[in-house]
Image (tube, rainbow, N blue to C red):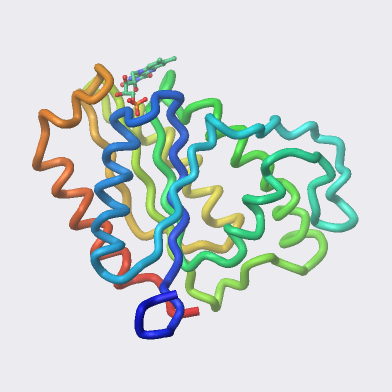
Amino acid sequence: MHKGGFDLKSILAISSSPRRNGNSELLLQSFAKGAEEEGCDVSLVRINELNIKPCQACDGCAATGECVQKDDMKNIYPQVASAAGIVLATPVYFGSLSAQLKAFIDRFQSWWHAKYRLNMSKVKPEEGKKAFFICVGALQKKEYCESALAVAKIFFHNINYQYKDCICQRGVDEKGAIKEYPEALQNALDAGRDFAGQTPDL
Ligand SMILES: Cc1cc2nc3c(=O)[nH]c(=O)nc-3n(C[C@H](O)[C@H](O)[C@H](O)COP(=O)(O)O)c2cc1C
């Protein structure tokens, strides 16, 4: 709750690198700081430190829209359902997302069933929830970031969050090397501020 007594806009910040305080997470933290400066309440979730198994394609969610696996995703679903905004951060791995983030995304197959088969979307498009994407790769090839972003956009569409923008940082490899690019961190902070203004009051 905000000091004034009204609810802060909540933003869910998903860090998916196995490197705590790695490059993508440092950009995410700057983004979060910017959003917090604009009055948002940002929850940072490090999915590498959670127990999140890959989708088993068991169709256990087909009739209910609820995943039947019992792991840490049970705490994530309500957070995604109630947030005003979501931001995903990932290192680029072999031209795609981290395995941690892909497993996380695939677990929203239950939401796919809810939306497309059961007509009971967990988030309604008219709620106007917003999404942002951050990725960091070592190489300059922009194709690597494009593949990762394409997957993220499909995910955002599936969960009825409107994709707003991305930061695709290339040419950064060693852990923490992003600190040598203060303009990139500032850019992430500014993006977080902007994003805060775009998320809805729920
Ligand atoms: C398994 C693995 C695969 C990678 N594949 C790519 C790649 O395809 N393209 C690229 O530009 N960088 C690649 N990298 C480098 C990382 O994207 C880079 O080190 C990045 O800064 C890591 O971000 P982090 O500190 O947030 O984990 C790879 C690194 C690892 C460990």
Q: Position of residue 67 (x, y in %)?
A: 79, 47
Q: Position of residue 185 (x, y in %)?
A: 17, 43
What residue is shown at x 45% (from left), y 75% (from top)? 1
What residue is shown at x 58% (from left), y 67% (from top)? 82
Q: Where on the image, by quarter, is ligand 1?
A: top left
Q: How many marks?
A: 0
Query: Does 147 sit left or right of 64 as displayed?
Result: left
Q: Image height check: is 105 above or below 132?
A: above
What residue is shown at x 27% (from left), y 58% (from top)? 192
To which quarter of the image does residue 106 belong?
Answer: top right
Query: Does 141 sit left or right of 199 as displayed?
Result: left
To which quarter of the image does residue 22 belong?
Answer: top left
What residue is shown at x 45% (from left), y 78% (from top)? 7
Nearest the eye: 31 or 133: 31
Query: Does 40 sit left or right of 118 as displayed?
Result: left
Q: Image height check: is 26 above or below 91?
A: below
Q: Position of residue 163 (x, y in %)?
A: 42, 58
Q: Position of residue 51 (x, y in %)?
A: 66, 32
Which residue reaches farthest front?
3
Nearest the eye: 44 or 127: 44
